[in-house]
Image (cartoon, helix red, strand yellow):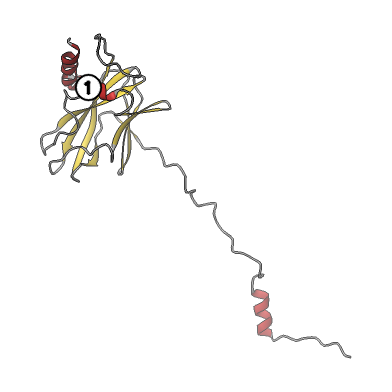
Amino acid sequence: MPHRVAVLPAAVLAMVCLAPPAAATPVQHTAARQPAGAAAVAPKLLRFGAAIRITGEKGNPLKIAPVGVYYHQPAAKGSAKPRNAYFLALAVRVTAVSKADQMPLPYGSQWRIRQGRRLFTTSSGRAMSAPWIGRAQDAHVTVHPGQPEVVYEAFDVAAKGGFLEWSSPEGLYRWRLPAGNAGTATHEAVLDAIADYEGR
């Protein structure tokens, strides 16, 4: 019986030669993709006193700037003591850009201080027992255009210095904290409150 050889038309033969192998899979270029959990780039370090623009509690634009810091170790007998080393008063100048508004509540935005690997917020330690709480103007004041206000935040921190951060849905901002009392023009309300509270 003669051996038969199948002859394929030229067009069919060309298609077979050009087609990729059946088991081949497309090459996946994953090297250039950023991992889902990749860390964000650290924010620029701002000069202490530099202002940023944020959204107020009612949705209106505000400018805020840290303008003073005061470290306090209570000496009066019977006065509240920090859990760490210092009560820290942060003075913040708040300016309404177009309409009256106030600082956003802490659940949406928050001040915090980083010292080494430790993070302190306005509710860390005994910050709420700082002697100027309830005596110096806090962030709940309504600010009107053309009438900037200075408000105070309290912290209970382990040392002087570190980095001040403002974290909000709009982003993260950082300032280097002075390692000593700074912005002395802003301390009057805090010093008056301390004197009233501690009897000095």
Q: Is residue 147 left or right of residue 117?
A: left
Q: Which residue is mark 1?
A: 183
Q: Is residue 156 above or below residue 143?
A: above
Where is residue 160 shown, x and y percent of the image?
A: 34, 19
Where is residue 42 shown, x and y percent of the image?
A: 40, 37
Near-viewer residue (84 or 150): 84
Task: Pick the quarter of the image with the C terminus.
Answer: top left
**Residue under the point 72% across and 85% down:** 8
Q: Is residue 81 above or below residue 118?
A: above
**Residue under the point 55% across and 51% down:** 31
Residue 18, by quadrant, is bottom right
Where is residue 16 shown, x and y percent of the image?
A: 67, 77
**Residue under the point 21% across and 24% down:** 133
Secondary structure at badge 1 equals: loop
Where is residue 75 shown, x and y percent of the image?
A: 26, 10
Near-viewer residue (186 or 158): 158
Task: Pick the quarter of the image with the N terminus.
Answer: bottom right
The amino acid at mark 1 is Gly
Q: Is residue 22 left or right of residue 107?
A: right
Outermost residue toward the right in this view: 1
